[in-house]
Image (cartoon, rainbow, N blue to C red):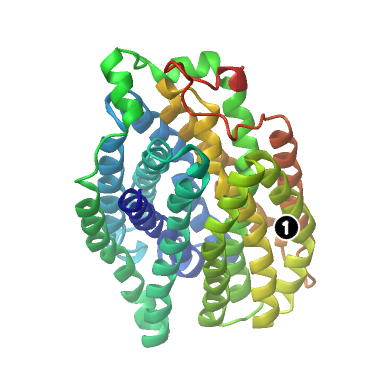
Amino acid sequence: MRRLAVAALAGTAVEFYDFFVYGTAAALVLGPLFFPTFSPVAGTLAAFGTFAIGFLSRPLGSVLFGHIGDRYGRRPVMLGSLLLTGAATVAVGCVPSYATLGVAAPVLLLVLRFLQGLGLGGEWGGAVLLTVEHAPERQRGLWASFPQVGPAVGFLLANGVILGLSAGLSDAQFREWGWRVPFWAAGVLAAGGLLLRRSLRETPQFEELAATGARANAPLVEVARGHWRLVLLTAGALAVGYAVFYAVSTWALAYGTERLGVSRTVMLVCIMAAVAVKGVATPFAAMLGDRFGRRPMCLAGCAASALWMFPMVGLLHTAQPLLMFVGFTGALLAFITTFAVVAAYLPELYEPRVRCTGAAVGYNLAGVVGGALTPIVATAAAGGAAGPPWGVAAYLTGIALLSFGCFALLPETRPRPVVGPAGDPVGKSAAA
């Protein structure tokens, strides 16, 4: 289990490094480089638009890789998704700016961001199922939380590299070539992740499905027919996590540097410190989920998010590093109270034959609702007002309440076995 957990964590860290380095670059430099004819705010919105494309392609990736995972195994998903995302990220670092290539530059950026999202859409399902389907029943939440630590590690790696370059280079050097280095580094990280993952064995549950001929012929069709309500509920339930995380990691970074005049370095340090706290807290929240249940933890996280969004925006507007850190940390702890347990919760809701597709599609559809739109909506909601952007807080609070309502309609799963006594799948009743 330790080896599996490390491989899952390393892979998600690399894939989310790729995804996050784009988000940070979109907040800091991509607007003026690829949309120079726009005003500063419009350029940022356009850069966040390319950022959103990655979320729109993630559900497609979950369908593609979910089919592979349910038909051919979880292991091929982990290798293929990592290779695709790594190659697309390296290519982003090679795209010439608008000044060199003209309108083709942002078009290429869109295509590569789409491919990034396609790969990441498959990653989560493969990594989570590898740990969930190997884990002891009463520690399933704990072991499944390791892939959930990966995004924090990936974020710290991405922003650590950008922070080092930002501190060591002049602003002109960073905008000319420094921002490309983190994208090129993705190639090295992806190669390391592939080496870690190539020796992993297939999960016992998939091997049993293959041996008995119980694999789904068309997983997406089965999910659409028998589990559509569950997919929609999980997408709405998980939207709060995406909204809160990207409000902190992407929108707040752009707002702090452009509107409040806080240095790029200070903003990155505040956000990275809060993400580090979130990463450390993840397995502890998962253990609480093993003890007290998945659904109570998810409801508590949604409630905490709803209560904290207005204080977070107020603390951000002070532009004081310590107060901003407190605001970001409170938001991310509320977020991880929910997201630490969903890696076990979602697979438990679906029967094994369609688990890779169902769990991944629900998870990544939530990214469209909560992740793709949040930086765009928040930037527009902040507008040009001189005071705190309370519209952003209201938007995030609304998302949190939506997610609370969706979780309230979902059943509890712990300590239900992943597979029934005679090998019969469970979860149909939960999905019905």
Residue 430 horizontal side relative to residue 162, left or right: right
Instruction: List x then y, in percent, for residue 247.
Output: 62, 59
Q: Does 277 appear above or below 150?
A: below
Instruction: List x then y, in percent, for residue 403.
Output: 69, 41
- Residue at image mark 1: 392
Regarding residue 90, the answer to whether it shows in the image is yes
Instruction: List x then y, in percent, for residue 108.
Output: 33, 50
Instruction: List x then y, in percent, for residue 85.
Output: 31, 49
Q: Residue 284 falls in which quadrant of the image?
A: bottom right
Residue 372 horizontal side relative to residue 194, left or right: right
Helix, strand, or loop for circle 1? helix
Regarding residue 376, the answer to whether it shows in the image is no
Q: Residue 220 falls in which quadrant of the image?
A: top left
Callout 1 crowding tier (Cα within 10 Å): few <14, some 14–19, many ≥20? many
- How many marks do you count on the picture? 1
Residue 268 horizontal side relative to residue 321, left or right: left
Which part of the image, by quadrant, shows the C terminus?
Answer: top right
- Going by the numbered disc 1, the residue's amino acid type is Val
Q: Does 147 appear above or below 268?
A: above
Seen from the viewer's position, the closer of residues 95 and 414 is 414
Seen from the viewer's position, the closer of residues 419 and 391 is 419
Q: Which residue is painted at 57% across and 62% down in the image?
A: 281
Q: Does 420 appear above or below 66?
A: above
Seen from the viewer's position, the closer of residues 118 and 32 is 118
Q: Which residue is painted at 75% across and 58% down in the image?
A: 393
